[in-house]
Amino acid sequence: MEIKILKNILGANDRIAAKNRELLDAHKIFAVNIMASPGAGKTSVVLQTIRALQDGVRIGVIEGDISSSIDAELVAKQDVPVVQINTGGECHLEAVQVQDALNNLPLAEIDLLLIENVGNLVCPAEFTLGEHLKVLIASVPEGDDKPFKYPLMFNTVDALVLNKIDLLPYVKFNVDGFTKTVKNINAKAEIFKVSCTTGEGITTWAKWLNSRMGKPLKKRITST
Ligand code: MG
Ligand code: ZN
C-alpha cells in the first residue's frame, strides 16, 4: 500500500517534470538542479557561478528552502531574477513547485536557470524537476565518507562540486580516496574542486557548465 502511494506521487511528479522540461526547452533555458546537505555552500556556489558567467549568460535562480528568503535576497543583490520557494517543512523540491516558480520568472530573459534544492542528501535525489543537469555540492568539513552513506545521491548526479577546499589543511579529508569512491559509485560524474572563499576552481567549473549548455551564447567566458 505504502509503495503504491509513493509510486503514484513519483509518477505525478515525473509528468509535471516533463512539462517543466518542455517549457524550459521552448524557451531554450538550460536548468541545473543543485543539491547538497545544509551548509555545504549551495548558495555560495550559485553566487560564484553567477559572478563567473554573468557577462555572457543570462541567469535566473530558484531558491528552495523550508522557510525564509535569506538566500533569495543574497541572489537578488546580483541583479538576476530569483524566485523563492518555501516548502513549509518539506525536505525536497517537487516538480509542481518548480512549475509555479517558472510561471513567476521572465523566461524569455533567461539562458541558465540555477535551482537550489532544499539542503538534504536523501529525497531530492528521487524527485526530478525537469532539469537538464543534476549537480551535487559536497564540502570538505562534511568528511570524505558521505558517498558511502548516501550512494543514491552520489549516483544520480552528472557533476560533483567539492567545495571549501581552502579548509583541507585543517580538516582530515582524503581527496584522492573521496574521488575514487565517487568514481566507483558513479563513473560518469565530473568532479570539480572549488573554494567559494578564495575563488579557486570556480572558473574551471563555470566553463564546464557553460560548455554543457550546448547553445550559442552572446559571448563565452574567456578568463582562466
Ligand atoms: Mg542556500
Ligand atoms: Zn524530502
Image (spheres, rainbow, N blue to C red):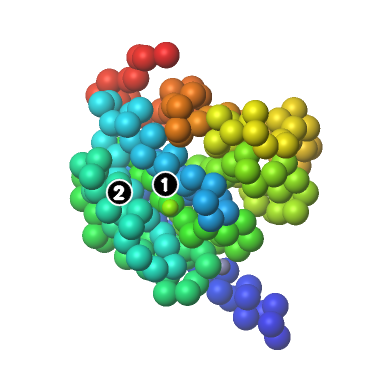
Q: Image check: 172 left or right of 121?
A: right
Residue drawn at the location 35% of the way across and 28% of the way down: 52
Would you place residue 174 above or below residue 185 in this image? Answer: above
Residue situated furthest bottom in the rendering: 1
Query: Which residue is the site of mark 2?
Result: 74
Residue situated furthest front in the rendering: 170
Cα separation between marks 2 and 1: 8 Å
- Where residue 60 appears, as percent x and y from the top left, is 30, 45
Q: Image check: 125 left or right of 50?
A: right
Indicate the quadrant containing the N terminus: top left, top right, bottom left or bottom right: bottom right
Some atom of ligand 1 lies within 8 Å of the CB belonging to the residue at label 1: yes
* Mark positioned earlier in the residue sequence (2 or 1): 1
Indicate the quadrant containing the C terminus: top left, top right, bottom left or bottom right: top left
For residue 43, the mark is 1
Residue type at tag 2? Leu
Crowd rating for badge 2 (residues with CA inside 10 Å; few <14, some 14–19, many 20+): some
Is the C-beta separation of discs 2 and 1 under 8 Å?
yes
Residue drawn at the location 30% of the way across and 48% of the way down: 74
Residue drawn at the location 30% of the way across and 47% of the way down: 75
Q: Name the foreground residue: 81 vs 140.
A: 140
